[in-house]
Amino acid sequence: MNLEKRFAMTRREFVASSAAGLVAGTVSGVRPGMGISPPSDQNSSHVSRVIIDTDPGVDDALALLLAMRSPELKIEGITPVAGNVPLELTLPNALRMVEIAGRTDIPVAVGAKGPLVRRLVTAAQVHGENGLGGAVFPEPTTKPIAQPAAEFIRDTVRKNPGEVTLITIGPLTNIATALSSDSELAGMIPRLVMMGGSLSGGNITPAAEFNIYVDPEAARIIFQSGIPITMVGLDVTRKTSLTDDHVRVLQAAQNPVSQAAARIARNAIDHTRAQGFVVGPNMHDSLAVAAVLNSSILQWKEYYVDVETAGELTAGETVGYSPNAGDDRRRPDLAKQAAMAMQIRGSAPTLASTNTSAVVRDKFVPNAKVAVDVDSAGFFDLLIGRLSGRL
Ligand code: BDR
Ligand code: CA
């Protein structure tokens, strides 16, 4: 189906087709032995309460617009954090997005200026000095709320235990700060859906994905918190590239969100092209939002994920342990036994260490559902459809 036809689909048709997918079991789209059912999620009739933690950021900006255009989400708040650019820019960028979407009813709470224990490393080379790829929007007039982000997250979750999903699309400093301030909080969070990590190499170093790299200590707190984690990492987000056709569809739609999205997208593509890339920028963060809206566009596999914090060259690497150590060549009956017996093993202890065992956990218990494949066309149908106002 060509793009024009794809976007000729109405909101009603889209909802019907997603719901049909859910019912028909195309949801999992999982190869036998490889995957799991998708994270218990949302279908079109269910409204999810969410907080979005973000560092806008070109792809964050589009992800925020997507979320604000999605009736399945009740956005309790937006919590900007330092990341792609400093907080002095991510905060007004988030406020700009709520203004553009006409959603100044959503509280925006000021987050951390920098990682827990490290100096801030930004990605202005990717997102432009203003964080929006050089696309300029007026100064926001909307003010953030007085409560800082970590407190806002804690209070909102505490007032609604088991109800509020966290969508994190930046470094995890705000969330880690909230969890560290309240030992019961993790148990009240039903799910954290993150854009972050990778089991197939990094983008800021060969080992680490940017969001985890910026604040690995914070990320480790999250992965060890017991919160059910849905990880949408580079393994899948690298398969989502924005194209000129997408921009044309956005430009053609005459509404403030599509016009703003088109400007940000146009700048981002031009910037990527000027750097010599032959494909457009990845829509990392929108894919995490899309995973909440319709998880059937992704395929999933369970892992125990931990974060490297000590590595001189590898800090921020997400290490994914899977049953059978990812080796699917065993007979199924023996594979099952091996999975049951699998230990989580770290580095060999040094001679100087008092700890003599390399085993850090006695058995494999997954802590994350990791996206391992994506229907990229289906994702862009959703993203561009929502931003253009067609869906
Ligand atoms: C992530 O890093 C940031 O640059 C993007 O906004 C995204 O959240 C991708 O690695
Ligand atoms: Ca981001």
Image (cartoon, rainbow, N blue to C red):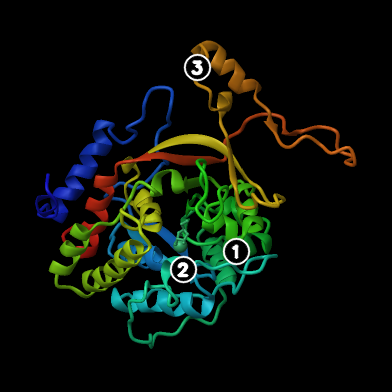
Task: Identify the residue at horizontal 58%, vertical 27% (top origin).
Answer: 325
Q: Residues within 10 Å of mark 3 (few under 14, many from 20)?
A: few
Residue 290 versus residue 88 in the image, above or below: above
Quadrant where the C terminus is found in the figure? bottom left
Q: Earlier in the sequence, mark 3 or mark 1?
A: 1
Q: Earlier in the sequence, mark 1 or mark 2?
A: 2
Quadrant where the N terminus is found in the figure? top left
CA distance separating discs 3 and 1: 39 Å
3 vs 1, front mark? 3
Task: Identify the residue at horizontal 35%, vertical 58% (top origin).
Answer: 281
Q: Residues within 10 Å of mark 1 (few under 14, many from 20)?
A: many
Can residue 161 be spotted in the picture?
A: no
Q: Earlier in the sequence, mark 3 or mark 2?
A: 2
Query: What residue type is disc 2 on?
Result: Gln
Q: Which mark is residue 173?
A: 1
Secondary structure found at label 2? helix
Query: What residue type is disc 3 on?
Result: Arg
CA distance separating discs 3 and 2: 42 Å
CA distance separating discs 1 and 2: 22 Å
Query: What residue type is disc 1 on?
Result: Thr
Residue 327 versus residue 169 in the image, above or below: above
> Which quadrant contains ligand 2?
bottom left
Q: Is residue 208 left or right of residue 250?
A: right
| Contact (Cβ within 8 Å) of mark 1 with mark 2 | no
Percent position of residue 136, x then y: 33, 81
Q: Which mark is residue 125?
A: 2
